[in-house]
Amino acid sequence: MKSVLEGRPGLRRIVEDTAEVAGFLWQRGWAERNGGNITVNVTEYADEEMRMAPAIAGPFDTGVDLPHLGGAFFYCKGTGRRMRDLARNPMANGAVIRLSEDGRRYEIIADEPVVPTSELPSHLSMHEFMIASGNGYRAVLHTHPTDLVAMSHNPAFLGKDVLTELLWSMIPETRAFCPKGLGVVPYCLPGSVELAERTVEQLGGYDVVLWEKHGVCAVAEDIFEAFDMVDTLAKSAEIYRSARSMGFVPDGMSREQMDEIKRAFNL
Ligand code: 13P
Ligand code: ZN
């Protein structure tokens, strides 16, 4: 069977970019087994043929209310699929899905009947928020960065913006390139609607959200931007851990130094 990517260079590029980032996640040690998931809104590449394509599986319930996503298309990592496998073969480890006009159901339309990630309720709820707010964001990335997850096991770090301030103060780049900081969602069952709802509550203020004792979720215009924010925050967490393991508490940039970055970068 012909791949949905054939004759659609824009869609192919999105899928290839996603595969490249999936490889980064594995290399960084953030994607044990099937850990993490990615979805990208690809509605802009859906032509008439894709709109009319017969379903190869479904319909399935989305489980969440998505009034702005009627008729939308997404490329999604498959549930139980490995990032390292997706990096090599994205259409055998991910699928393109099409939402119904009321956004309550979806069908898999290409290339194989790969069931989307178990975190689809959170991902689609975040896409719904992004379309409703008109921010132009298309990508959602969830991954398990070791040092950030470790930090989420300390209740002292989970107060509003406590981790944001600490991570910003570790290196100027984090203040500059993750300017909204890191929201926190208390532990919820993976894949649950509660996790989806608590995550969306944070998106008004943050582009990256820490899921307590689980991982992070980032939203951005494209998958590289989403990866870069997580990578930057993870770098700060690594610097913190490195300093602590050398036996001292890192000094951290001062508030004046962080404010200077804010002014310099017009944040
Ligand atoms: P999936 O394999 O269903 O994408 O789940 C991985 C994960 O990280 C759940 O939070
Ligand atoms: Zn996870």
Image: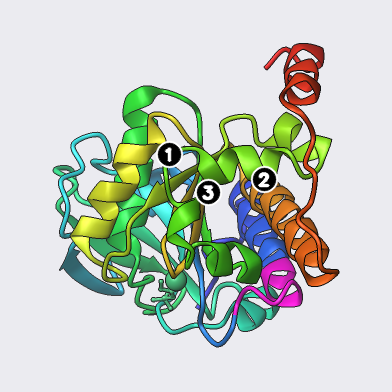
Q: Find numbered disc 3 in the image and state the secondary structure of the residue it sits on.
A: strand
Would the CB of label 3 be found within 8 Å of ligand 2? no
Residue 19: percent from left, percent from top: 66, 66
- Of the image marks 1 and 3, the number of the one nearer the N terminus: 1
Name the residue carrying label 1.
160
Decide if residue 247 is in sight here: yes
Q: Is 249 covered by the magenta stretch?
A: no
Q: How many marks?
A: 3
Would the CB of label 1 be found within 8 Å of ligand 2? no
Q: Badge 2 local density, few (<14 within 10 Å), some, or many (20+)? A: many
Q: Nearer the viewer, residue 245 or 172?
A: 245
Q: Find numbered disc 1 in the image and state the secondary structure of the residue it sits on.
A: loop
- Of the image marks 3 and 2, the number of the one nearer the N terminus: 2
Q: Badge 3 local density, few (<14 within 10 Å), some, or many (20+)? A: many
Q: Which residue is painted at 43% across and 69% down in the image? A: 213
Name the residue carrying label 3.
218
Decide if residue 225 is in sight here: no
Residue stretch in magenta: 23-31
Instruction: Inspect the image, locate mark 1, and give the three-letter code of the amino acid beneath it.
Output: Lys
Q: Which residue is painted at 32% across and 51% down in the image? A: 124
Q: Nearer the viewer, mark 3 or mark 2?
A: 2
Name the residue carrying label 2.
167
